[in-house]
Structures are given as structure tokens and as C-alpha cells.
Image (cartoon, helix red, strand yellow):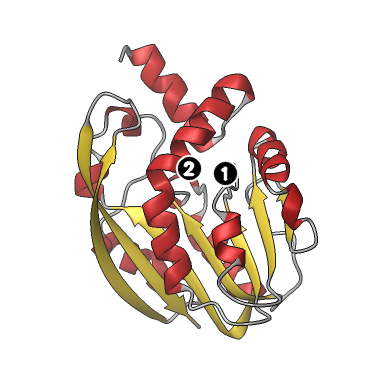
């Protein structure tokens, strides 16, 4: 891919917009599905849980989440108006259980101790003030709640040509340090590997990623 194409891809991975954003949203759902399902599994969802996802994309995975227990309430938030519209369209059958909220990306618009479970997949690279954002997640998570943060490891991500455009990458030690600077105190690290089609669509690659299960 040409440099300009890589830059457009990177921009749409961070904040999908318009027709190109819809296309990339579909691609992200496909390539990130393994990471998303592992993250949902790590949440250990129970009946009646109130669940928040930060960066829901096109929301095609929400049906899988809602099937994991009874009487769940799911809220997804995203900075992309395009993904907000797509997620609502893709989940019309779950309007009584799933809600999608458009937000500006810094302040989480919820009351203290609202959620039993919170998760996010492949968004940490774009957080402008990561410690502040983590503390915002801490604020809205219940005392006995679980937060799952999933990200591609630096040594894998830096090989991808588009990550040179405004991606902040982390290895496990760097992420542990970041978490330790927040209010969170306890975490479990699980490393994963999977083979996926690259986001440039040119090859299959082995992705190494980490699922962090974090508690107060």
C-alpha cells in the first residue's frame, strides 16, 4: 500500500468515517473477532450484569455477548458516528438489551460505580491521556467489578506499516507500568497468539496480543 493509503487506513482504524469507515469497520470486526471473544470470555459474565464496551465498532459481536447470560444490559460507546450508526443498525433485534452511545473520547459519561464489567479491545493506542482514562474507568466500575483491556503487543504491532501513524504501542511491561500509575492495583496477564488476515489485506500474519484482567 502507498503511504497515503496507509495513513487513511490508520485514521479510519482510530475513528472510522463514511463509506470507507464502514468498509474498515467490517474488516476490523472480522480481524479483531478472536481478540473480542477472548476479552468477553475473560469478563466471566454473570446473569444481570451491566456491561460497558469502550470502542464497539460495528457491533456485530454484541449478539454473542448477550447470549452468555440472562438479563444482561450492554452499553457500547464509540467516538465514531459512523460506527455508532452501524452498531445500532446491526443490533435492532436487541434494542431492549443493548444501547450505543456516541462520546467525545476523553470523559466517560456515566455515574460512579455503574458497571459490573467493562472491556475494550484495540483502543488503548489512541488514548491521549491513558492514566486519566484508566482512572475514569476505575470510577465507573463497581468495587467488585472486572475490567478487561486487550491490546496487540508492541513487537507485533510495530511491524505493521500503518502503526507509525499516531499509534502509541505497548509491551506487557510498559502496560503494567501504565496500569500501576492508575488507581487499579490488581491484574492478571494472559498472552495469546492467532493467525489472521492483515488489515492491509495482503497476507496472513501471526498476531501476538495480551488480555489484561484488571480489578480494583
Residue 84 occupies quadrant: top right
**Residue positioned 63% across, 82% down in the render:** 47
Q: CA distance from mark 1 to mark 2?
A: 7 Å
Report the side of 200 relative to 173 (left or right): right
Q: Work out which residue is located at the far bottom of the displayed protein and give it.
A: 144
Q: How many numbered marks appear?
A: 2
Residue at 49% across / 29% down in the picture?
Answer: 24
Q: Evaluate if marks 1 and 2 touch, with contact meaning CB atoms under 8 Å apart.
A: yes
Q: Is residue 181 visible?
A: no
- Residue 205 location (% of width, % of height): 21, 39
In this picture, is 103 found above or below 131? above
Name above or below for residue 62 compared with residue 60. Answer: below
Which element carries disc 1, helix, strand or loop? Answer: loop
Q: Is residue 24 above or below residue 63?
A: above
User: Which sits in the foreground, 135 or 65?
Assistant: 65
Secondary structure beneath label 2: helix
Residue 27: quarter of image = top left
Residue drawn at 41 percent across, 47 percent down? 32
Mark 1 or mark 2, whichever is nearer to me: 2
Specify which label sits upstream in the sequence, 1 or 2: 2
Residue density around tag 2, few if under 14, some if 14–19, many if 20 or more, within 10 Å: some
Residue on which the image places disc 2: 29
Q: Quadrant of residue 53?
A: bottom right
Residue on which disc 1 sits: 57
Q: Few, some or many C-alpha atoms within 10 Å of disc 1 (few <14, some 14-19, many ≥20)?
A: many
Residue at 57% across / 31% down in the picture?
A: 16
Q: Nearer the viewer, residue 155 or 32?
A: 32
Quarter occupied by the N terminus: top left
Tell me residue 118's x, y (percent): 57, 68
Residue 15 picture location, percent across and down: 56, 34
Image coordinates of residue 138 in percent, x first then y, are: 58, 73
Amino acid at each position: 500500500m502507498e503511504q497515503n493509503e496507509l495513513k487513511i487506513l490508520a485514521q479510519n482504524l482510530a475513528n472510522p468515517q463514511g463509506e470507507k469507515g464502514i468498509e474498515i469497520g467490517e474488516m476490523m470486526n472480522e480481524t479483531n473477532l478472536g481478540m473480542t471473544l477472548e476479552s468477553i470470555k475473560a469478563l466471566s459474565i454473570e446473569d444481570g450484569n451491566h456491561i460497558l464496551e469502550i470502542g464497539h465498532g460495528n457491533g456485530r459481536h454484541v449478539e454473542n455477548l448477550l447470549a452468555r447470560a440472562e438479563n444482561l444490559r450492554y452499553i457500547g460507546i464509540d467516538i465514531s458516528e459512523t460506527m455508532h450508526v452501524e452498531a445500532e443498525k446491526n443490533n435492532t433485534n436487541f434494542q431492549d438489551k443493548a444501547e450505543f452511545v456516541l462520546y467525545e473520547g476523553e470523559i466517560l459519561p456515566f455515574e460512579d460505580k455503574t458497571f459490573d464489567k467493562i472491556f475494550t479491545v484495540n483502543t488503548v493506542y489512541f488514548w491521549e491521556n491513558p492514566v486519566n482514562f484508566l482512572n475514569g474507568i476505575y470510577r465507573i466500575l463497581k468495587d467488585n467489578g472486572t475490567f478487561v483491556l486487550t491490546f496487540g503487543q508492541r513487537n507485533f504491532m510495530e511491524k505493521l506499516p500503518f502503526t507509525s501513524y499516531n499509534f502509541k504501542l505497548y509491551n506487557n511491561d510498559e502496560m503494567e507500568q501504565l496500569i500501576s500509575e492508575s488507581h487499579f492495583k490488581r491484574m492478571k496477564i494472559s498472552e495469546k497468539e492467532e493467525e489472521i488476515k492483515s488489515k492491509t489485506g495482503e497476507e496472513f500474519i501471526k498476531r501476538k496480543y495480551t488480555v489484561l484482567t484488571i480489578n480494583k
